[in-house]
Amino acid sequence: MEIISFVQQSKKKRAIALPLRRKSINSVSYAYTYPSEKHIFKAGKVQKDLTLKNCFASLGQGITNFGTLLANNIKAIVISLFVILGIAGLAVTAFFITDYTLSHTKVITLNAQDSIDYDSLDKFMKNFALEITSEVDENGQLTDSAGVGTGAGLQLASKLLSQPVEYQIYKVKSGDTISGIAKKFGLTNISTLISVNDIGNVRQLGAGQKLKIPSIDGIVYTVKNGDSLNSIATANKIKLENLLDVNELASETLTVGQQLFLPGVGLDQKTLQSRMGELFMVPITAKFRWTSPYGWRADPFTGVRSFHTGTDMACPEGTPILAAMSGRISEVGNNRTYGNYIIINHGNGYQTVYAHMSKAISKKGQWVTQGSKIGLVGSTGYSTGPHLHFMVYKNGNRIDPMTVLKK
C-alpha cells in the first residue's frame, strides 16, 4: 500500500490593530482524490493530561503570547490611550470650566427695559423698609430716627447697678417687635430680652408668648468650670461690687451651671446676628462653585467696570434652591434681566432675591421655612450658564450676602 503523508505547517502570525481580537481554530480538514477513492485527513486539538507541569507550561505560553501581542500592537495601544485621555480631558474641561467657573454674565446690550428691571427691584425693596418701626445697630443698640443711641436706658441702668435686678412678665401682642418691646420698658439693647428669655430666633416670637423683662440692660451668663466672680467681672468689664449687688450674692462662691445677670453687657455680634435670624443658610446644599462675588468688578467679556449686585453659585440645571431664611414669598416673576426669580420677605428689614431659576416652585404669598425648596437652578435671563444669582437687601438697600451667610 502506498502511504501518503501530509505535514501541516503553521501560518506566520501577523500584527493586528485594535480592537484586539484573536480567532482560534479548533480543527482543519484536508482532502485529496486517490484514483477512485476519496480520503479525508482531519487534524484536531491535541489533548494533554492535566498536570502541574502542563499548567505552568500553558501559563507561561499565555504570558508569552500576551507579551508578543502587546509588543506587536504597542503603537496602536499608545495612540488609543492618548485619544481616550484627550477626549476625557476635554469633557472634564467643558463641564467644570466652561459651565462652572465663568461669571455667567454674557455680553448683551442693556436697553430701557433692563433699566426698569433694576429700578423696579430697588423700588420694590425700598418699600419693605417702611415696616421697620425702630432701628437697631449691629450691636443690638436701639437708635432714634437720627441714628443716635437713646441713652435714657443707660442712665437708668447706671442708677440701678447697686440694686438687685427685678423682673416683670409681658405678654406679646400682635404687631409687637423685639425692639418695640425693649423700648417700651426703657431698655436700650435688644440683647437683654433675647438673652434673658433665651430666644433662639426673634422671628419666631408670636402673639401670646410671655417674656421676662428685667429692670436694667444685661445678659444672663451660665457659670462654667474654673470660673470665678473676679474672672467673670474682668472678662466682661464689670465692677465686682456691681456684679455682687445686682445678683444679691452673699459670697463669692460659685457653682457650675449657676446663672448670673451681667449688668450693662450685650451679646457679641455673631450671637446677636444668629438670634435675630440674620444668619442665612447658603441657599444651595448640593455641590456648587462660587463664581462672581458681590461688588465692583470688570465684566469678564467686555472689560467694562460694573457692580455685581449679588453672589453667584454655579451648579447643574435643576439643582434645588432653598429659602435662606424663613419668610413670606412676596414676589414671583420673570424679566429679561433676572429671568425667573423669587423674592422672600424675612421681616426685620431683610429680603432675599433668587434669580435665573429654570422654574419657581413656591407661590406668591406662601410662607416658607428656612431650607424649604422654592425653585430650581437655571439659566434664564441675563445668564450664560446654569447658576443661582443670590441677593440680600436690608432696609431696602443691597448688602454683601457673605456678611450674613452662615460660615
Image: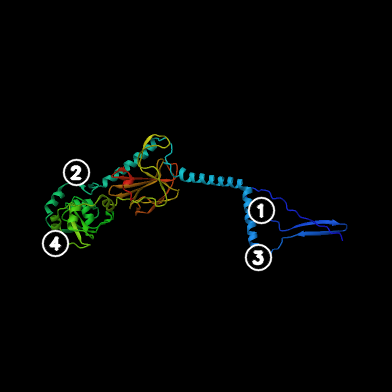
Q: Where is residue 237 drawn, in percent x and y?
A: 18, 51
Are discs 1 and 4 less than 8 Å apart at CB? no
- Label 1, on which residue? 22
**Circle 3: residue type:** Thr
Q: Which-is-in-front pick, marks 4 and 2? A: 4
Q: CA distance from mark 4 to mark 2?
A: 40 Å
**Circle 4: residue type:** Ser
**Quarter holding residue 124:** top left
Element assignment for label 2: loop
**Circle 1: residue type:** Arg
Q: Residues within 10 Å of mark 3 (few under 14, many from 20)?
A: few
Please give left or right for residue 24 compared with residue 318 in the image: right
Q: Residues within 10 Å of mark 4 (few under 14, many from 20)?
A: few
Sequence-wise, the earlier of marks 2 and 3 is 3
Q: CA distance from mark 3 to mark 4?
A: 95 Å
Q: Which-is-in-front pick, marks 3 and 1? A: 3
**Quarter holding residue 46:** bottom right
**Residue at horizontal 64%, vertical 51%?**
68
Q: CA distance from mark 1 to mark 4?
A: 95 Å
Q: Which-is-in-front pick, marks 3 and 4? A: 3
Taking depth in this image into account, of 307 and 86 the one nearest to the observer is: 86
- Label 2, on which residue? 148
Q: Which mark is residue 51?
A: 3
Compared to residue 89, the image places residue 370 above or below, namely below
Please give left or right for residue 227 compared with residue 55 in the image: left
Sequence-wise, the earlier of marks 2 and 1 is 1
Q: How many marks?
A: 4
